[in-house]
Image: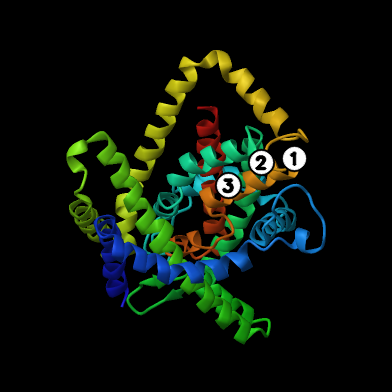
Amino acid sequence: MKKIFTLFSIFFISNNLFADNNASLSDKINSFFEPIVAILAQVIFWDPIAALGFNLGADIPIVVIWLVFGALFFTFKMGFINIRGFRHAIDLVQGKFDDPEDKGEVSHFQALATALSATVGLGNIAGVAVAITVGGPGATFWMIVAGLLGMSSKFVECTLGVKYRIVNENGEISGGPMYYLKNGLAKYGFSNLGKVLAVLFAILCIGGSFGGGNMFQANQAFAQLSGQFPVLEGNGPIFGIILAVLVGVVIIGGIKSIAKVTEKIVPFMAVLYVVAALIIIVINYAFIGEAFSMILKGAFVPSAAFGGFIGVLIQGFRRAAFSNEAGVGSASIAHSAAKTNEPVSEGIVSLLEPFIDTVVLCTMTALV
């Protein structure tokens, strides 16, 4: 079943590029999804503050409020684990506490690299650009704050992912929100609610994977390459097939195959990005102080773009959530496969993700 779904995903990657040369197919796909997206948007982006009759100068979607308060709650509830657990997280990733007898399919580092492979990229570039364009330089400050708070959310969701994971007779692992929503809530007498939320998450996760994880990424990759190499223009279908085959080679082998690739690609990708950013920053070193000054001043000025202070704050948190996915739950699927018998240990490893993705990479993008 997993392989069938994987092949179906690959088909959508290439099929989306075929749509470039077939407007009617593209229109049909859009017409099918538009009413669904419209309904979801009314729920996810509903503004409870405006519904109460208050005008803070910016839209405040319920999903952002939920993520912010969740991150704050977990930060205080867990005694600032995002700070206390940072050093231990590095030790765990280095393998200092590995036990080859522990159940699991991938190492702590492989799980971290796999989860980062899904977050480092579009959000670090386009997400930061959107935040600064709409909210001004001050949005960067709130992105960093959101990243730090998101470390606590990531810790909780990945700890739960390991705690409620399922290990079959072959040692293969299945985990994530689908399991801890169902089994975790059942322990507190909310079995039916847990099942409904688990199914809902699975459906939305599939939708997000097709849209933001496959189609959008494939089109962006083709647009960038065809812009640099004109010979590719008009050959979207061929590019899509090649990309689908390459992706298929990696993911059909399951989490072990994915981890083996990501543990090599992600560090290289991150280092390459940081080095490129540092070159630009060093060349323009005279403006570093001014850039930080703009970020700090812009974070609190009432007259900032898009609704003043509240608008800047919301933009920062929205872009951070898009970038690091803290609180979304998807990362716990990868971390559930880690070799460990202690769920908290993998939760501690996972808190490095928002730090690397948002605090480090997004900040460098903002400075650039």
Instruction: Judge by depth and name the residue closer to the eye, 36 or 271.
Output: 36
> SS of the residue at dot 3?
helix
Q: Is residue 153 above or below residue 172?
A: above
Q: Position of residue 288 (x, y in %)?
A: 58, 19
Q: Amino acid at mark 2?
A: Trp
Q: Amino acid at mark 3?
A: Ala
- Which residue bears the numbered disc 3? 320
Q: Position of residue 158 (x, y in %)?
A: 54, 61
Residue at position x 57%, y 47% in the image: 319
**To which quarter of the image does residue 187 belong?**
bottom right
The mark closer to the camera, 3 or 1, is 1
What distance separates the C-alpha of mark 2 from that of mark 1?
10 Å
Instruction: Judge by depth and name the residue closer to the eye, 28 or 173.
Output: 28
> SS of the residue at dot 1?
helix
Residue at position x 72%, y 57% in the image: 69
Q: Is residue 210 above or below residue 280?
A: below
Q: Is residue 366 above or below residue 57?
A: above
- Which residue bears the numbered disc 1? 309
Instruction: Judge by depth and name the residue closer to the eye, 26 or 133.
Output: 26
Left or right: where 144 falls relative to 89: right
Instruction: Judge by depth and name the residue closer to the eye, 296 or 71.
Output: 296
The mark closer to the camera, 2 or 1, is 1
- Which residue bears the numbered disc 2? 142
- Name the image quarter holding the N terminus: bottom left
Mark nearer the N terminus (3 vs 1): 1
Mark nearer the N terminus (2 vs 1): 2
What distance separates the C-alpha of mark 3 from that of mark 1?
17 Å
| Cβ–Cβ under 8 Å for marks 2 and 3 | yes
Q: Position of residue 305 (x, y in %)?
A: 68, 37
Label placed on residue 218: none
Residue at position x 71%, y 49% in the image: 58
Tell me if residue 229 can be seen.
yes
